[in-house]
Image: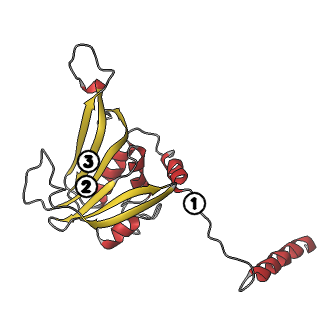
Amino acid sequence: LRLVAMASSAYENIRGALSGENGSDARVEVNQRALIDKILARYASNGAVYRELLQNSNDAEATTAEIIITTSPSSNGDSSGVNSNNNQLVTQVIYRNNGLPFRPQDWARLRKIAEGNPDESKVGAFGVGAYTMFSICEEPIVVSGKRGEEEAMIFFWKGDGLWTKTGKAPAGVVNMSATLGNADDNNWTSFILPSRDPYPLPDLVE
């Protein structure tokens, strides 16, 4: 018991000695690139990014979600000159849904790793899972808002630190769908994900 009391006393003495004007403060720094890599290690599936974005669409009460995949032929394609899905490489993915557009608090949460939706009835809503974007893309872009009022957030790296910049999106940037031509649909959230390294076309059904 005496040893426990001495240890407790030492703890309080040290904290007391370094509190107030004594000692110097220094914020703990995080290598954000390494942290995101560790987060992504939890999501082993190649299709994790699509699963997470679909879950976020559900949380946003979307009725429609669309994945627009841009590909280019692989240099290892077959000699027949016929490009099948098996020798196509993904160069960009645009994922979008017609759920509720981002509110200021949604944009703020997207900038904070691991801070998900405080609504317990929602599974995702841009918490850790949204960072699966970085499994396929180095610097994602997110666009959301009512038609003509869309805001955009770009992610970019400064060394190993991740930064964002937010502003008004260029006119018409969200209305790029080749399959949904309904002009009455005016609320879209889009994730524009150019490939870090082109990769084989995934099996989205799987």
Element marked by disc 1: loop
- Label drawn at residue 189: none
| 16 to the left or right of 49 | right
Residue 129 visible in the snapshot: yes
The earlier-in-sequence mark between 3 and 1 is 1
Crowd around label 1: few <14 · some 14–19 · many ≥20 (10 Å): few
Q: Which residue is depicted at the point 91% across and 71% down?
A: 3
Report, in whole angstroms, how far the alpha carbon at label 2 lies from the one at label 1: 29 Å
Q: Is residue 80 above or below residue 38?
A: above
- Label drawn at residue 190: 2
Between 42 and 63, which is closer to the camera in this rendering?
42
- Label drawn at residue 94: 3
Asked if the residue under mark 1 is in contact with the one under mark 3, i.e. CB atoms within 8 Å, the reply is no
Quadrant including the N terminus: bottom right
Between 171 and 99, which is closer to the camera in this rendering?
171
Amino acid marked by disc 2: Ser
Q: Is residue 5 above or below residue 93?
A: below
Percent x, y for residue 102? 28, 66
Percent x, y for residue 120? 40, 66
Amino acid marked by disc 3: Ile
| 17 to the left or right of 126 | right
Element marked by disc 2: strand
Percent x, y for residue 164? 39, 62
Crowd around label 3: few <14 · some 14–19 · many ≥20 (10 Å): some
Asked if the residue under mark 2 is in contact with the one under mark 3, i.e. CB atoms within 8 Å, the reply is yes
Percent x, y for residue 83? 22, 23
Looking at this rendering, what residue extends furthest in the right direction? 2
The earlier-in-sequence mark between 3 and 2 is 3
Q: Which residue is depicted at the point 54% across and 49% down?
A: 38
Crowd around label 2: few <14 · some 14–19 · many ≥20 (10 Å): many
Q: Which residue is mark 1?
A: 30
